[in-house]
Amino acid sequence: MPRDDIAGGLRDALDAGDELALAALLHPDVRMLVDSGDSDGVDARGRAAVARFLLARRARRRGDVLEPVQVNGCPGLAVRRGDGLVVGVLAADVGPDGRIEAVWLSTSAPKLAHWNRGRSGAD
């Protein structure tokens, strides 16, 4: 999959709850770091563990919209609530083989402040 299509493929797999499609996007040794801004952060390794975590997280937040974005030059997803407020940003580091080698997910409100500038309820 071309690098530009990674975010859309990731969104589609998560929205469909398709573990096989999601796993196909991930390198077998993928690493995921979740920065929640508190002690609930996550550090997971391996395609199965990362896919399960992301799918479970998506299942809990079905009302949110996943929007393909660029995050620090990487393909990614902004997670928006129904009111448009960004509640998470995921960045994917894509390896030379086109698979995701690392995933960073930030759900820390202070770190998401610049994604929500000008939005009511963001501060």
Image (tube, rainbow, N blue to C red):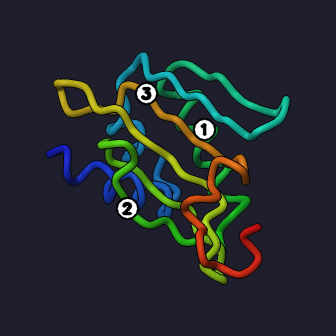
Residue depth check, mark 1 versus mark 3: number of the one nearer the observer: 3
Residue 52, position as x, y percentages in the image? 60, 38
**Disc 2 marks which amino acid?**
Pro
**Disc 3 marks which amino acid?**
Ala
Q: Which numbered marker is on residue 52?
A: 1
Residue depth check, mark 1 versus mark 2: number of the one nearer the observer: 2
Q: Is residue 54 above or below residue 95?
A: below
Q: Nearer the viewer, residue 16 or 93?
A: 93
Instruction: Using residue 100 as the reference point, say whether residue 1 is left or right of it.
Output: left
Mark 3 lies on a secondary structure that is strand
Q: Nearer the viewer, residue 90 or 49?
A: 90
Q: Quadrant of the N terminus?
A: top left
Residue at image location 28% in from the left, 48% down from the top: 6
The residue labelled by disc 3 is 102
Residue 37, position as x, y percentages in the image? 76, 38
Instruction: Tell which circle, 1 or 3, labels the residue nearer the N-terminal end.
Output: 1
The residue labelled by disc 2 is 68
Instruction: Using residue 98 as the reference point, say whether residue 84 is left or right of it.
Output: right
Residue at image location 49% in from the left, 64% down from the top: 15
Q: Which numbered marker is on residue 70?
A: none
Residue 84, position as x, y percentages in the image? 60, 78
Q: Quadrant of residue 27?
A: top left
Residue 108, position as x, y percentages in the image? 71, 47
Q: Nearer the viewer, residue 69 or 47?
A: 69
Instruction: Tell which circle, 3 or 2, labels the residue nearer the N-terminal end.
Output: 2
**Disc 1 marks which amino acid?**
Arg
